[in-house]
Image (spheres, rainbow, N blue to C red):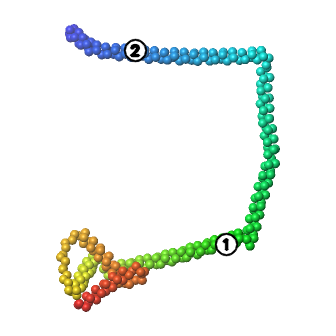
Amino acid sequence: MTNKRNQSRSADWDTYRPDRADSSQSMRRARDTHRERRALELQDLKDRTEGRQERVNELEITRRERAAELERARLDEKRRGVNPETERQTLAKGRRDAAADVRDQNLLRVERNRPDAITSVAQQAAQAHQEHRQERSVVNDPTSAEYRGLVEIKRDSAERLRQHRAERDAEDVKLAGERRIAAAHMAREARRTRMLREMEEETGLNSRETQLAEVGALAKLMSEVREEMAAEKGMKVSTPKPVERTPEQTEALIDLARVNIAEVRKAMSKPEAPESSKTHEKVGGLLSKLLGRKRRSA
C-alpha cells in the first residue's frame, strides 16, 4: 500500500511539475513587464517634472531680465532728468495737436470747395429744370413733330391692342364652337353605339353562332362577287384551299370580322357625321352593290 501511495504521489508530482514551471515563467514575465511599465511611467513623470521646472526657470529669467531693463530705463530717465508722467503727457499732447491740425486742414479744404460744389449743384438743377420744361413744351405743343409722333405711337399701340383682343376673342369663340360640335358628335356616337348594342342584345346578334354565320355569309358573298368579276373579265379564279386554323387564329378572325360588320352597319345607318365618315359611306355603297348583284344573279 505504501509503495502504491508513493508511486501515485510521484506521478502526481511529475504531472504538476511542468504546470508549475509554466506558471512560474508566466509570473516572471508578468513581473518583468510590470517593472518595465513602472520604469517608463517614472521616467515620464521625471521628464514632465524637469520640463515644468525648466519653464519656471525660463519665466523667472525673463521676469528678471524685464525688471532689469525697466530699472535701467528708470535710471537713464533719472540721469537725464525726465519724468515718465511728464513724457507721457507730452506724447499725448503731440498726438492731440496732430489730430487737430488734420481736422483743421479738412475743414479749410471743405470751405474752399463749398462754393464750387454749390455752383455745380445749382448748374445741374438748372439744366435738369430746363430739360424738363423743354420736354413739357414739346409734349403739350400739338403743332410739334414730337407731339404728333407720340400721338401716332399711342394710336398704333391702341389699334394693335384692339386687333389682338379681337383676334383672341374670335379664337376663343371658334374654340368654344369646336368644343361644342365635338361634344355633340361624341354624344351622338355614344348614343348610336348604345342603341346598336341594345338592338344586338335584343335580337341575339351578339351571339357566337350569329357572328360565325355572318362571317361565313360575308366570305361567301365576297367569293361569289370575285368569281362574277373574274367571269366578266374572262379570268379564272382559283378556289382557295381550306386552311386549318388554331382556336386563337379563329378568335382573331372573328374579332376582325366583328369590327368590319360593325363598320358596315354604322355606314348603312347613314348617320350625320363630318367629312371623315366618307369612308363608311363608300363601304355601305359597296355592300349595297354586292347585295344587288347577288339578288340579280338569284
Image coordinates for residue 106, horizontal then vertical, percent: 78, 40
Residue drawn where x is 78% and y is 32% of the image: 98
| Quarter of the rendering containing residue 229 | bottom left
Residue drawn where x is 36% and y is 78% of the image: 197
Dot placed on the residue nearer the N-terminal end, 1 or 2:
2
Residue under numbered circle 1: 152
Q: Is residue 157 left or right of residue 275?
A: right
> Which mark's residue is nearer the viewer, 1 or 2?
1
Q: Badge 2: how crowded within 10 Å, few (<14), some, or many (20+)?
A: few
Image coordinates for residue 163, horizontal then vertical, percent: 59, 74
Image coordinates for residue 6, horizontal then vertical, percent: 23, 9
User: Is the Cβ of the residue at disc 1 closer than 8 Å to that at disc 2?
Assistant: no
What's under tag 2, amino acid-wise? Asp
On the rendered image, what quadrant is the C terminus found in?
Answer: bottom left
| Quarter of the rendering containing residue 216 | bottom left
What's under tag 1, amino acid-wise? Glu
Residue drawn where x is 79% and y is 19% of the image: 82
Q: Is residue 266 visible?
A: no
Q: Badge 1: how crowded within 10 Å, few (<14), some, or many (20+)?
A: few
